[in-house]
Amino acid sequence: MRHWLLSLLLCFLPVSNCLAVVPSTLKIALITDVHYLSPQLIKEGDALKAFEAASGRRTRELHEVLDEVLAALGREKPDILLVTGDLSNHGELVSHSGFVEKLRPLQNAGTRIYVIPGNHDILVPDPKAYKGSVSTPVKGVTPDEFARLYGDFGYDEALLRDDASLSYMVEINEKIWLLAIDSNRYNEQHSTSISGGRIRPETLEWALEILRKAREKEVMVLGMMHHGLVEHMPYQEAFFSDYLIEDWRQQANKLADAGLGVIFTGHFHANDITLHTSPAGNPIYDIETASLAQYPFAYRVMQLQGNELHVNTRFVTSIPGNPDVENESRRRLETITRRVAQNRLDIPWVPIPEEVKNNLIEMIVQLHLMHVRGDETTNPDLRESIRLFAAMMGAEADMESFAFDFPPEDKEVLLTIGVK
């Protein structure tokens, strides 16, 4: 009955009078993983120092980075701005309210803004303030509260809402719909946020029905979701499964075959575009954008004309409070990546020779720093590290066939969107 009613509604979707003129070019901006932490929740002290040391972030700098990006977008005057999750640091109500106010000037200037939650936004069990010597609990938000807070950024404009999640669909113009998919698992959270994502079966059927009707009406659908839909690097499913939705290959095939040609994602804090083609021959691009909360502080400004999408990536390299913010944040990310790699390789029951471990750690650090910025390329030092590591493991590295970066290009590229 639910899908029968959805089909009926889709047949009679109204076209708003204000959208009667279809723009020849749609300018799309995108930011993601802002992790906004309200200034009301921070104060110099041991708690803030511990948080910044663990996360590698400098909270006050991140406020300046966000201000720089929003000011730049104000000059760009995009038609729409997409924000693909992790709007708040860790689900704090005060941070969500503050982020809404940060977006208001751009909206008031004429840009339509659409958001979708990330795993750090809703029903987070441990949102905190960082003041004084220890962090203290603060109020978070429920799914209903999230939809009310961001009512002006997609939810109140939605022509269709999914009953099983915070997914929704809006009409951008007569020929373009936006399908925002909520892939989070906040209802399962107990001690902290769950990083992994999934598309609920009911939500997938809801989305597929929208895509079927869009194809009948010859409407292009743009997708957005927090989690990655397809792999962006070799062995991502094996080593970083929390950054993909569950059963990603089957889900991507279904969405591509139903007519979804592009989806905008975040979550992995990396700047990468990957093309996936279903067994039926239908392509879908997953355009993943890096976080505004760490190096390389990336955002996208894109032009859609017909079925051609020109993707351009911008980077924040300096802010008034720190002209060298790019290099300093890169060094902090390098330190954290090395620490994480060290911890993951310290496995008592899997002894690894120290020389092999150190070589592997350096490989991981170099690859990660390249991946987050996009358009990874090898260099002599990295190739030598891989060759040495392979030799230590009693194998040979075939550098000619090993792919560091799945096509297409990640920073600037012209994509043709559509089903074959």
Image (tube, helix red, strand yellow):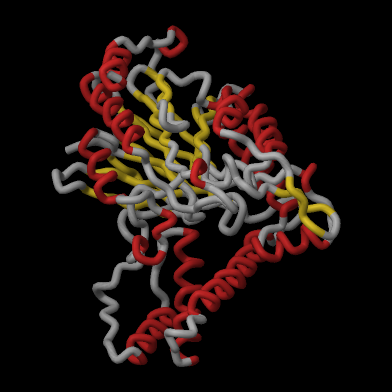
Horizontally, residue 287 falls left or right of residue 251, namely right
Residue located 51% across and 24% down the image = 155
Residue located 44% across and 37% down the image = 182
- What is the x, y in percent for residue 192? 59, 52
- What is the x, y in percent for residue 23? 40, 21
Q: Which residue lies furthest to the top in this view?
A: 17
Quadrant in which the N terminus is drawn: top left
Residue 202 vertical position relative to residue 199 in the rendered view, above or below: above
Residue located 44% across and 7% down the image = 17
- What is the x, y in percent for residue 222? 36, 33
181 and 366: which is toward the camera:
181
Tell me which corner region of the image, top left, top right, bottom left or bottom right, holds residue 340: bottom right
200 and 9: which is toward the camera:
200
Residue located 39% across and 68% down the image = 377
Horizontally, residue 152 falls left or right of residue 37, namely left
- What is the x, y in percent for residue 296? 56, 57
108 and 86: which is toward the camera:
86
Residue 329 vertical position relative to residue 35 in the rendered view, above or below: below
